[in-house]
Image (spheres, grey):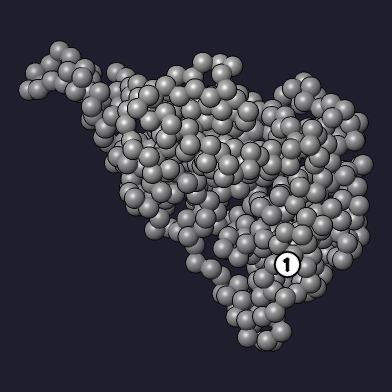
Amino acid sequence: AHHEDDQTMLGSDQLRQTGMPSGTGTLDIPPKRRLQIEYNPFVDIIKQAIYKLMSSIGAKRLEGMYGNVWVEFSGMARQYNPVNLGQGFPDLPVPDFLKDALTTAATSNDVLHQYTRGPGHPRLINALARLYEPLHGYKINPETDILVTVGGYESLYCSIMGLVNPGDEVIIIEPFFDCYLPFVKIAGGKPVCIPLRTRSNATTSADFYLDEQELRNAFSDKTKCIFVNTPHNPTGKVLSVKEQELIAELCIKHDTICISDEVYEWLVYPGIDHHRIATLPGMKDRTVTIGSAGKAFSVTGWKTGWSIGPSHLLKHLHAVHTNSLYTCQTIMQEAVAIALEKQIEMLNSDESYFKFLPKMLKKKRDQMARFLSKSGITPIIPEGGYFMMADVSQLGIEFNNDEDDSLYDYKFSRWLIKEKGIACIPPSAFYSEANKALSGKLIRFCFIKTDETMSMAEEKFDLLAKSLQRRSLILDQRDTNIPFYLTTSQLRRINGVVLKS
């Protein structure tokens, strides 16, 4: 059913929720009609149900936001119990110094079980100021220039809600962390999406690049903010100084605020440096930098993040936080503060966790690249983060389900989970509707996993390669004494795929 006033589309699932009798039929709605339902047996009942449903429907700003890639693929992971290389949560043992910090926070002082200062626990904001002042190269006032949030996620939310007005344009570089787009829409802003382009035969995340002219064209006198994510999720790209200088030039020219998502700041691999855009000339007073204890310490369940920036910007983020969440868990903030204080003391030593983590993950990154390559999949080696994009086109797998109009990466990811026991994520989920097809036959894998998980994944990919080799042999043996044959229709039924000879 279609209602002209608010463009609401009601499907069969929503109609069933009303408790009405169910049936089959097509609602073919002519344009410019106030309300017409071509389902004659139930016209009066349906009309009443629709008006009732419309009167209680959720806020219009949430339309299109009720489902996402995590809902589907988390559910599939629970159902099929695959080796999970999909979602970016570590399954590594938590280091003892973090457990000790949390224990100390929970047992040292009963006051820590009560509310703390709303914009940030005093011990934590002081530790953050100590950590970031030398990294940013300027004085940070912990009271006014820092906001502690429920993960980097809330920092992103507060940034958009605090700085974007209806009609403001916000530039989003895609693929993007999937909350960027809905946050901008909820705020009433207009997303302006520009894609990272990919060089042919890409082998590293440096082969994803910004087209300078596309970036320049994205800016206008209506541009309020730009999201910059480095190291980048999902590609693993680390923006170069030259790329950041171009972004800085355009931000200054168009008086644009930069929201710099740097939650993977410590996860850069040898030979690569993480550059902070706030340190570039003219950017200190127009940049909000976002960090995360969950990513820095591999404890995503701690859900503690922060925003750092000049007080004239941060005061707006403070207002959003104060009038929504008000404050974060005191014990978690105390524990993060204790952990940071310990790392500050050893920041430049090999004992630092921030030095240990990328060294450890490099081995896992390289292991994943090896077993993907061995399986006929082309890895795109990330410069940072713990995700790897990979091109599966050489496997020669095609899907022929005409009833499923999903993009290739969704079909492949579902098949890989159901039939091969390996969970991954389709990267088209991180593109705007207009550019989803740019994901092509790329798939995202996560490698911040235990040695056991990585070994299980390697075994699964070995089995995948062997199964494809066997089927390829069948397809190639057209003139031999093989004692059996497969028809085209039978081939199409093999795990729901067609293999190109």
Relative to 338, does residue 277 appear above or below in the rendering? above
Left/right of residue 210 with respect to residue 496 in the rendered view: right
* Residue visible at 18% across and 14% down in the picture: 478
Please tell me which residue lies in front, 71 or 394.
71
Q: Where is residue 381 in the image (x, y as percent from the top left)?
A: 55, 39
Most extreme residue toward the top is: 479
Q: Where is residue 190 in the image (x, y as percent from the top left)?
A: 74, 32
Left/right of residue 448 with respect to residue 15 in the rendered view: right
Please tell me which residue lies in front, 55 or 230.
55
Q: Badge 1: how crowded within 10 Å, few (<14), some, or many (20+)?
A: some
Relative to 119, does residue 2 appear above or below in the rendering? above
* Residue visible at 60% across and 65% down in the picture: 302
Relative to 59, does residue 39 appear above or below in the rendering? above
* Residue visible at 60% across and 72% down in the picture: 98
Q: Where is residue 187 in the image (x, y as percent from the top left)?
A: 73, 42
Left/right of residue 137 with respect to residue 211 in the rendered view: right
Most extreme residue toward the front is: 44
Relative to 333, does residue 361 appear above or below in the rendering? above
Q: Is mark 1 on a helix, strand or loop?
A: loop
Q: Which amino acid does label 1 sit on?
A: Thr
Q: Across the whole image, how many numbered discs are drawn on residues?
A: 1
Q: Where is residue 133 in the image (x, y as percent from the top left)?
A: 85, 60
In which quarter of the view is residue 59 placed? top right
- Image quadrant holding the C terminus, namely top left
Please tell me which residue lies in front, 304 or 377.
304
Q: Can residue 501 be seen in this view?
A: yes
In which quarter of the view is residue 122 placed? bottom right
Q: Is residue 388 visible?
A: no
* Residue visible at 91% across and 31% down in the picture: 253
In which quarter of the view is residue 114 placed? bottom right
Please name the residue that numbered disc 1 is placed on: 327
